[in-house]
Amino acid sequence: MLKKIFFIILSLNLLNHCDYTPVYSKLNKVDYKIVITSFSGDKDVNNLIATNLKRTSNEESDQIINVIFNTKYKKNVLAKNSAGSITDYQTDVVTTFIIKKDDDSESFSVNEKFNFKKMTDKYEEKNYERNIKKNLANSISEKLILRLAVIK
């Protein structure tokens, strides 16, 4: 019994004095201001990307990064059944970014794809497609933020 109490007190003492910090705790802390100069292409995806970038931007920073992007959204037929009606779709979002910082300019492209089945209810399918666009835009904006962290 005494050994158990001693072990519990020792382990709690060690845990209290341990300086634990999460590895990725400072990942989303940016020290630059992201200014979206212009964007073109799919309106929904562009607005979602712009909202995500504004949310992560540090408005009080002196370092300014200008971003221009063009988004192309396509919904392709992936499969049909034996009767010829569509069963599967593939959404494809290609975003081309041009990043300007000081006198440097860099261009890169991000391609995201997602496959999904056709639904019988058109309203549910539109909502599902809207959620897919939101998730793809979040993924694209996260890839841009990681790319901006490398540019510094």
Image: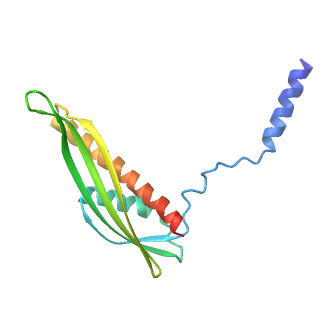
79 relative to 149, above or below: above
Residue 132, position as x, y percentages in the image:
30, 44
- Quarter-wise, where is residue 14 in the image? top right
Residue 140, position as x, y percentages in the image:
38, 55
Residue 112 left/right relative to 55: left
Which residue is the extreme one toward the bottom? 103
Q: Quadrant of the C terminus?
A: bottom right
Residue 87, position as x, y percentages in the image:
17, 32
134 relative to 122, above or below: below
Residue at 48% across, 75% down = 64
133 relative to 57, above or below: above
Residue 89, position as x, y percentages in the image:
21, 40
Residue at 10% across, 27% down = 82
- Quarter-wise, where is residue 117 in the image? top left
Residue 81 left/right relative to 60: left
Q: Can you see residue 69?
A: yes
Q: Can you see residue 56?
A: no
Residue at 53% across, 64% down = 150
Q: Quadrant of the N terminus?
A: top right
